[in-house]
Amino acid sequence: MKTFKKLLLAGLISAGVSLPAAAADKAMVNPQGNVLVGYWHNWADGAGYKGGNAPWVDLDEVHAAWNVVNVSFMKAYPPQKIPTFVLDPRVTDAEFIAQISQINSQGRAVLLALGGADAHIELQTGDEQAFADEIIRLTEKYGFDGLDIDLEQAAITAGDNQSVIPAALIIVKDHYRAQGKNFMITAAPEFPYLTVGGAYLPYLDALEGYYDFINPQFYNQGGDGLWVADYNNGQGIWMTGEHDEFPYYMSRALANGIDGYSQIPHDRLVYGTPANIDAAASGFENPQDIYQGLTRMAQDGQALHGIMSWSINWDMGTNVSGAEYNQQFIKDYAEFVHNGPVDPNEGFPEIAGIEDTSIQLGSEFDEMAGVTASDEEDGDLTESIIVTGVVDENSAGSYEITYSVTDSDKNTTTEVRNVDVLVNQPPVIIGVEDETIFVNEVFDPMAGVSASDSEDGDLTDAVIVSGSVDNAVVGDYSLTYSVTDSGDVTTVEERIITVKEQEDPGENTWDAATVYNTDDKVIYDAVEYTALWWTQGDVPGKSDVWKADTNGAVLEWSADTTYNGGDKALYQGLTWTASWWTKGDVPGSSDVWKQD
């Protein structure tokens, strides 16, 4: 197989890529030559189609062969309709910006992916400038190099998306063209939407002359394909993704606008395939078939622009048995696409010893203690490390320190370190809100309850619960939760559990088995809720799909509820107002909440 792949490398796609290469003058990075496009999950522990798991991966862990990284996803957060990007709290803004900068310094692009399967994006005429402004804001904040349209299902044709989204992207592209930069525009349509008259064509037609390349998804579409009239001695054949010649005939159809498909020029066409059987419900192909199909395209003089995959995280994930996929996709395709091996660390210095840490208020902090830098060519570069940022040992808070070092080849590595200056704060218990259950309903006093401490970390196992609940007898039951940290500071919280008779379901009472559509209303636990989109089985008050209709009343704060800027909640007898989007942040312990 290795020998076979080497035979293919010379003829696949016009020019190879030299990786890594330094970016200059903060220009937007547009990889030259072939592209290997991978989607990066802004969340952890994605469930696979075959029972596997896709883990959280830091951007700086992404293999250098992925020279276009699509950050997933930018989407709408109801009730706001203008899509935005909310960074997962596992990484700070400063860390994320530094990671993107490091990828850019290697000549690799980082795009923001718009959509995803649950995006629920629905823009209207008149939203063009507001959407363009938000894209520009996020681009300036994080350093993105472009945007990938990854709309699926109803979002493709919802509202005026087909005209508003292209118009907004044209505004953005022209904005950066005026600065001498190319804001990349790509798209990942599921391939059945690319047939003549398909739902994705309004996007491609409007963005002609503006989009950089298109990477169709040739997966999750079992049974779809094309009729190849000149196959089988002119007898024709219906060909699907399960056919071993599908990569060639599907690419040929799109590159030439034949066999019922619209045209995407071959040099702007990227072949999309899943990383493994967990990443997609169907469409996983033998790499050998893709090698053969794309090599035939090159031999026809229509070499493709590269290969795309969902996803980077899945390539680094595990199967149902817990065995690692071990980046097999990279092993199969990196050399094939880039015409040679790619070393993710080649040429760049390494910084060691800058793990996040915490110190006690008033103690000394040496920012260089245990920190070193080295480079294969230059050796020890520790004395060349530049540190920016200051830790005030006498003021409690969280501080960010940035370390950077540049070697003799002008390759720069940047790392961010978090340092917390702590006082002995009391531990925090969350998840102990008052709750109502029905007679004989199972109740676990520790379900959803956790405790943590700024010095000791997770203290959930140290929580002591006093009191009991008899779920067979109607009544109010008091439970007391207490936890003590290593500094002998104790936090006590109380909650009331109400046991009541099962109510006779009324016409509008929420039912887990019922399908609800947008704007449907239900009653749950004496509160009326409105569905924001299609749902079944999502419990009101514990899922973002339901919005409480409180008629001005302020409800108790819940860790399961999403709050937007201006929303109010009761917590420990006080009313709090959210300053921006939040979920799970406890009022009084996070800056997002302001006490009324």
Image (cartoon, rainbow, N blue to C red):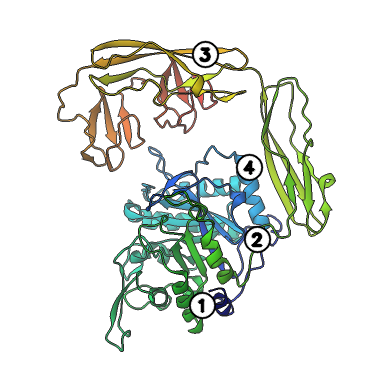
Left or right of residue 398: residue 549: left
Can residue 596 be seen at all in this image of the molecule? no
Which sits earlier in the primary sequence, circle 3 or circle 1? 1
Locate residue 146: give its quadrant: bottom right
The residue to which callout 1 is attached is 303
Secondary element under disc 2, as helix, strand or loop, is: loop
Three-letter amino acid code of the residue under disc 3 = Thr
Which sits earlier in the primary sequence, circle 2 or circle 1? 2
Which sits earlier in the primary sequence, circle 3 or circle 4? 4
Q: Residues within 10 Å of mark 1 (few under 14, many from 20)?
A: many
Left or right of residue 259: residue 409: right
Q: Residues within 10 Å of mark 3 (few under 14, many from 20)?
A: some
Locate residue 109: give its quadrant: bottom right
The answer to the question of whether label 2 and label 1 lie on touching residues, with beta carbons closer than 8 A, is: no
Picture coordinates of residue 256, whole percent (x, y): 41, 79
The residue to which callout 2 is attached is 107
Distance between the alpha carbons at the discs numbered 3 and 4: 33 Å
Q: Which mark is residue 95?
A: 4
Three-letter amino acid code of the residue under disc 4 = Glu
Viewer-nearest of labels 3 and 4?
Answer: 3
Picture coordinates of residue 150, whole percent (x, y): 43, 56
Question: Eyeballing the image, is 595 above or below 58?
Answer: above
Front residue (pair 107, 83): 107
Distance between the alpha carbons at the discs numbered 2 and 1: 22 Å
Distance between the alpha carbons at the discs numbered 3 and 1: 66 Å
Three-letter amino acid code of the residue under disc 1 = Ala
